[in-house]
């Protein structure tokens, strides 16, 4: 029986050989395995628009939909995603953190456009209030004359204002909704968004990062492992992982790794990179006594 035949039929020998290779790979220093120059070259080849677009369409967006549907089905609350100690710490950070003012965003909203958008709403609200006042014209005249009559009219106006304020929020909400749904409102909202986006593209990235750095993101990052462990061990976490693995295999399961890499245009570069890394692993294996023993078993 040849060495290849033995390797094909002897499961224990295969398992032993794989264990030796894996142990040899794990024993290598990270700096010896990660070739930054080679990895950057691979990224330049692999990170291209077409396969990334397919990944978004076939994996990222459907994954979000599945996650949303599963959490809706389970009626999951945000607090369930947090272990108790993380929830307490996040609440403390929320109460004690002085949030940045995001000065760079101050000019993102065009005040003139905002005025054009909402001034008709405020005008309508004011007209509704004024229309409820009894004898508005007489009220002005009495106010100029003075006396108890004017005082009584002003008191009545205050009463009407107090009563009107109780329904003002609902009135304002409906008026804003109607304004935003109008043709002019939609046009102004589009202009506001366009102005905000164009402003953002001109903002120095350092200013944004400075505001971000003022937030307690380091403390939040320290909580992330506990939150991830809590979620992955939960029933929801198990369901999501199983669903995502099944969904990925449903789309990509019949394809070879070579096909995926070839689609990304990275197959030759990845093959060359792995061969270089494999040579390093093999050089380490040659010096391993266990590998020599294994080879002698394989040779029979």
Image: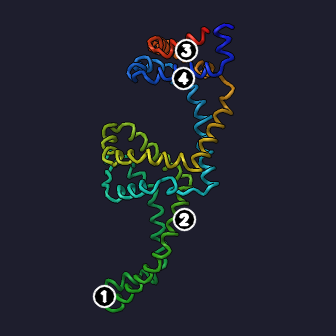
Question: x%, y% of residue 154?
Answer: 37, 84
Q: Which part of the image, by quadrant, shows the C terminus?
A: top right
- Name the one closer to the observer, 218 or 31: 31
For label 4, the residue is: 19
Q: CA distance from mark 2 to mark 3?
A: 79 Å
Nearer the viewer's eye, disc 1 or disc 3? 3
Element at label 1: loop
For label 2, the residue is: 174
Question: x%, y% of residue 195?
Answer: 42, 43
Does the image show residue 215? Answer: yes
Which mark is drawn over residue 146?
A: 1
Question: x%, y% of residue 293?
Answer: 52, 13
Q: CA distance from mark 2 to mark 1?
A: 38 Å
N-term mark: 2 or 1: 1
Q: CA distance from mark 4 to mark 2?
A: 69 Å
Neighbor class of circle 3 (other Cα within 10 Å; few <14, some 14-19, many 20+) is some
N-term mark: 1 or 3: 1
């Amino acid at each position: 029986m040849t060495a290849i035949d033995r390797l094909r039929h002897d499961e224990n020998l295969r398992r032993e050989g794989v264990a030796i290779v894996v142990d040899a790979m794990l024993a290598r220093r990270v700096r010896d395995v990660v070739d930054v120059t080679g990895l950057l070259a691979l990224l330049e080849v692999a990170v291209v628009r077409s396969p990334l677009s397919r990944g978004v369409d076939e994996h990222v967006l459907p994954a979000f939909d599945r996650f949303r549907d599963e959490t809706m089905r389970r009626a999951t609350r945000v607090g369930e995603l947090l272990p108790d100690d993380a929830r307490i710490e996040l609440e403390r950070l929320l109460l004690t953190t002085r949030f940045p003012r995001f000065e760079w965003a101050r000019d993102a909203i065009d005040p003139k456009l905002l005025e054009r958008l909402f001034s008709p709403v405020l005008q309508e609200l004011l007209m509704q209030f004024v229309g409820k006042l009894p004898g508005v014209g007489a009220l002005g005249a009495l106010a100029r004359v003075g006396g108890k009559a004017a005082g009584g009219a002003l008191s009545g106006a205050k009463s009407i204002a107090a009563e009107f304020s109780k329904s003002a929020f609902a009135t304002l909400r409906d008026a804003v909704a109607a304004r935003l749904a109008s043709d002019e409102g939609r046009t102004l909202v589009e202009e506001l968004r366009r102005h905000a986006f164009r402003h953002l593209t001109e903002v120095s990235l350092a200013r944004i990062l400075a505001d971000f750095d003022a937030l307690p993101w380091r403390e939040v990052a320290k909580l992330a492992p506990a939150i991830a462990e809590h979620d992955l061990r939960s029933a929801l976490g198990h369901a999501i992982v199983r669903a995502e693995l099944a969904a990925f295999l449903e789309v990509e399961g019949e394809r070879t790794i070579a096909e995926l890499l070839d689609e990304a245009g990275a197959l030759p570069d990845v093959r060359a990179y792995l061969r270089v890394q494999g040579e390093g692993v093999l050089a380490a294996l040659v010096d391993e006594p266990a590998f020599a023993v294994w080879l002698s078993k394989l040779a029979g």
